[in-house]
Amino acid sequence: MSALRDEVKYLKGVGEARSRLFGKLGVVTVSDLLRYFPRDYEDRTVFKTITELADGESACIRGVAADAPRLTRTSKGREVATVRVYDQTGMMDVRFFNSTYVKKAITAGGTYLFFGKAFRAGGSVLLTNPIFERADSEGVFTGKIVPVYRMTAGLNRRTVISAVELALQRCGDTLPDALPRAVREEYRLAVARFAYENIHFPKDFEALRIARRRFIFEELFVLAVVSRLRRAARGQTAGRVITTDGAAPRGFEEFYASLPFEPTSAQRRAVDEAARDLASGGVMARMLQGDVGSGKTLVAAALAWLAAKNGCQTAFMAPTELLAEQHFRTFEAMLAPLGVRVGLLTGSLGVKAKREAREALLKGDTEVIIGTHALLSEGVEFRELALVITDEQHRFGVNQRAGLSKKGESPHVLVMSATPIPRTLALILFGDLDVSELNELPPGRKSVLTYSAGEKLRARVYNFARRLVSEGRQVYFVCPAVEDAENEGAAEAASGSELKRAREYAKTLQGEIFPELTVGLVHGSMKPREKDAAMAAFIDGGTNILVATTVIEVGVDVPNAALIVVENADRFGLSQLHQLRGRVGRGEHQSYCVLMRGADGEKSRERLDTLRATNDGFEIAEADLRQRGPGDFFGSRQHGIPVSRFAEQSAEASTVWDARRAAEDVLNADPRLERRENLPLREAVDAVLRASAGTFN
């Protein structure tokens, strides 16, 4: 075990400088490195002749360099090395960008193995920036399944692969196994060593499938154990009793009657479910799930009203100032007519306004406070905090959510999420929470019309955007990244994919496509105030087109936005695309979502067709679970649990149920995990509990 706790800087070839780069990826110890699973794999086991290569196909080619590399420069000054290569069936060109070393690495007459994506134009074949090595090098980089890791600038794949190989050699016989032997045998799961070796360096695709299945199961199993232990602990805590008796003889009818619309049956059901928790004598820990626009805010306002009628205070925390201000206006419109005093506390408020807001809270004059992280500040004290609500709870770190709860004595907690999660997976991720679902939209809401399009239709998409703007509407263009990542450039050049990068794309749209319009930009790397200013300009109508990353996935309402174009849509999960689609359709105008395919493969088309077929977030989430596996729903920011970093796993819902059943069996037999065979599991559980200390989820 000690070797697993060693820092990666002590591995040969890493050192102090590279260890800092690994640290940016969350890899500090050898154990972290072994759990830094590949995000994808390249199949370099398939060899083709030059004439067999199909356009867009990735394969290995054995060829002879007909001449030495020829160096030229592009008009922008980029150096290009081109080599003519032949085999027994034909000729092709191999092209390298900004790779001066190629001139010495490839010599005329030498035989080499190349791996890359082929491009055909007429009778000619081209490989761009392929992986290559001499044919007599015994297949160090070709002829095998090669892992692809998420990178950071300054770190390359060969360094990571080398470090992982060393870590496996050093720790292979001492790898901890959180799965008890009985569980492994019952569910036919691989032992730890086999799983680690074949998740990083699979000997074949069957071994990779077996390793993936084991890690998916392990992850779900540990989460299920943690959830059951948390639920058991919460059941022993007493909470403030908040009843409808303290509000009005007719329960929530006074609140509902004050609204200018009729709540949906789903909203009423969610309110009733939470109200039973509040009156139970225990501590409510409930999650409210619902699509964008399903009316979660109404449920929160109803519970805040009930708390106020019982002499208690409610704190509502939103992830951004713009969202907090939007919620403040909504809560005040709903609650002020009923005599409930609503306040606002954000970081940008002036000194006097902050002081007055804090004083009103301490005196109890403010019954509902809407705010951002400013609610966590020292000096923010409540007279009687009994209900804590967090909006888009996955946007907050676990310590932030815990910090707000600590400002009261075991307050009731409601977390709201517009990210529908499959019911099967929710049993694991949020097994310690009670879950309410808003599965119907308020009447009158128009569905967003959704289309997928390839590059051939790009001009039509631009013209459609221009037409909508001429009619007074606004448009989002969403990109999968801010700017080119140094370590992705070569891979993308080789694959022929051109990811739309937010900064560069905004310049292109403004300068070349829509010079007569105003194009704005917002992304996660901007400072909060810059981000808010860019969003405010769009909300106010000063910006016609907003180029953004997924920072807008959950955000403020812009009723005038009628079109969202998602570039390289195949790079996103279905649930994330559904969230992005929810940015439009917020007003009276018919709205549209266009999913631009970065790859025209059949798999990509089929995935996007799911979104075209339905607007039901829960149905889409189930499809995402089937297609991508549970990895798409994991993330420590969402539920406070440091889980594995699979990108596209393959797990059926039955695996989720099996993991939950196994957790129940183990805990029923050994509630405290004290038996010797359960000690590794106890360590894994303790690590999760330490990482999320003080939170229910």
Image (cartoon, grey):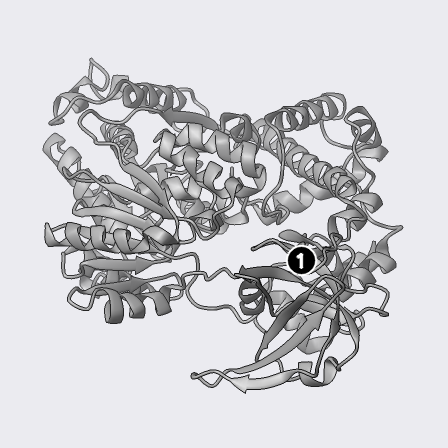
The one nearer the camera, 251 or 243, is 251
Badge 1: residue crowd in 10 Å (few <14, some 14–19, many ≥20): some
Q: Is residue 197 left or right of residue 48?
A: right
Where in the figure is residue 275, as x and y percent of width and height? 34, 22
Q: Label 1 belongs to which residue? A: 51
Q: Is residue 180 left or right of residue 641?
A: right
Which element type, helix, strand or loop, lies under badge 1? loop
Please say if 286 is above or below 172: above
The one nearer the camera, 398 or 539, is 539
Residue 558 visible to an observer of this rendering: yes
The residue that appears at 78% across and 63% down in the rendered structure is: 6
Q: Quadrant of residue 619?
A: top left
Q: Amino acid at mark 1?
A: Thr
Residue 38 visible to an observer of this rendering: no
Where in the figure is residue 135, as x and y percent of width and height? 82, 68
Please say if 249 is above or below 358: above
Where in the figure is residue 137, as x and y percent of width and height? 84, 69
The residue that appears at 78% across and 33% down in the rendered structure is: 189
Q: Quadrant of residue 106?
A: bottom right
Please say if 503 is above or below 577: below
The one nearer the camera, 642 or 145, is 145
The residue that appears at 70% across and 81% down in the rendered structure is: 67
Where in the figure is residue 82, as x and y percent of width and height? 61, 78
The one nearer the camera, 483 or 281, is 483
Q: Is residue 570 left or right of residue 241?
A: right
- Residue furthest toward the right? 173
Q: How many marks?
A: 1
Q: Quadrant of residue 65?
A: bottom right
